[in-house]
Image (tube, rainbow, N blue to C red):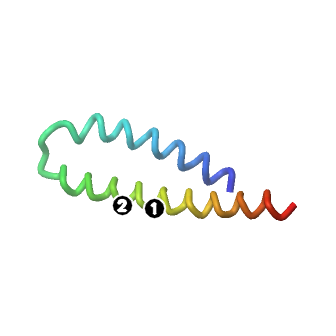
Amino acid sequence: MAEGIELVSAMITRYAVVESLYLLEDSTLQNQLTDGITKLYVAILRYLGIAKTYYNKSTTSQ
């Protein structure tokens, strides 16, 4: 689980750079890129919700 959170952190940082480089300019693929990044962020938020539940169960059951 900790490795997954580390991966998520790296992905958020990486795609923040992608946003700043490619979403400020008008492009024919801008809408597709925006949709893809939005779907990625939704998946990340879902994963973080699962991770939060996992860690809350681990600490309360001890």
For the point 79% across and 61% down, the residue is: 60
Q: Amino acid at mark 1?
A: Ala
Would you call the spot at circle 1 few (<14 residues within 10 Å), some (14-19), or many (20 or more)?
A: few
Residue labelled with disc 1: 43
- Residue 57 shown left or right of residue 61 in the figure: left
Q: Position of residue 38 (x, y in %)?
A: 33, 56
The residue nearer to you, when weighing 48 against 26, is 48
Residue labelled with disc 2: 39
Verify CB contact (< 8 Å) between mark 2 and mark 1.
yes
For the point 40% across and 57% down, the residue is: 40
Q: Mark 2: which secondary structure?
A: helix
For the point 71% across and 59% down, the residue is: 56
The image quadrant of residue 36 is bottom left
Say which mark, if any, is on residue 59: none
Dividing the image into 4 quarters, which one contains the C terminus? bottom right
Residue 15, relative to residue 55: is it above or below?
above
Q: Position of residue 48 (x, y in %)?
A: 56, 56
